[in-house]
Image (spheres, grey):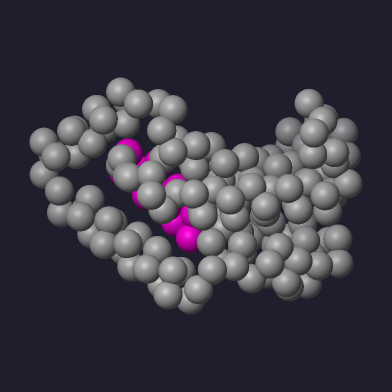
Amino acid sequence: MTDNSIQELRKQLDELRDKYITATPRQRLGRVRERLEDPGANPNRLVTLVGGIEALARSLAMHVEHQGKEELRTCYSKYKNRKTQTLVEQYCKFRGVEVPKEYFGEDNWELFLLAIGYRNLLAHESTYLSNQRFGILETACNEVLRRLANLAKLKWDAT
């Protein structure tokens, strides 16, 4: 992965966000309809993948500090609005990983952070993007998820 590729993804994210900010309601509805017509598309996969990392990181962070179902229910409000990056970093720190980008790999970490931005755009703007760039974002997120599970000593293939 080159710095140019990451910069191109950042630029694309900014440009797409600008397009959706200035789009007409008719244009916005068109994109929403496209997304609804193809629920198996990569945009939905990326939303699910980043959301899955967030969910796992939240659970790991909560279980580090709290025990028992009632205590977990009580503390959930403290964790539910934390950013994905913050949750992952918090758990990493607990496990002795001070610099997550070193543990996950610098490119994986940078692409994961970009994937969070794309996920937010996809979820909040219900946009529909081409599949050409999602491969590297999805690969990086899968690696972050796999390494996060490994750090927690969870079996990757467990159901």
Q: Residue at x 67, y 54 (%)?
A: 144
Image check: 94 left or right of 7? right
Q: Above or below — where is 43 with respect to 140?
A: above
| Main SS of residues in magenta | helix
Residue furthest bottom as drawn = 3
Disc tally is 0
Image check: 144 left or right of 69? left
Q: Above or below — where is 40 with respect to 108?
A: above
Q: From where the camera sits, is residue 146 visible?
A: yes
For the N terminus, give its image quadrant.
bottom right
Residue 119 included in the magenta stretch of the image: yes
| Position of residue 140 measured from the top left corner of the image (x, y, whole percent) | 60, 55
Q: Residue at x 64, y 47 (%)?
A: 142
For the C terminus, give its image quadrant.
top right
The quadrant where residue 70 appears = top right
Q: From where the camera sits, is residue 81 visible?
A: no
| Position of residue 114 measured from the top left corner of the image (x, y, whole percent) | 48, 60
Residue furthest top as drawn = 37
Q: Residue at x 53, y 37 (%)?
A: 48
Q: Above or below — where is 150 with respect to 90?
A: above
Image check: 79 left or right of 33? right
| Position of residue 27 measured from the top left corner of the image (x, y, whole percent) | 14, 40
Looking at this view, is 135 or 71 the one in front?
135
Q: Above or below — where is 17 with respect to 75?
A: below
Residue 88 included in the magenta stretch of the image: no
Q: Residue at x 23, y 59 (%)?
A: 18
Q: Which residues are magenta?
A: 113-126
| Position of residue 75 measured from the top left corner of the image (x, y, whole percent) | 73, 42
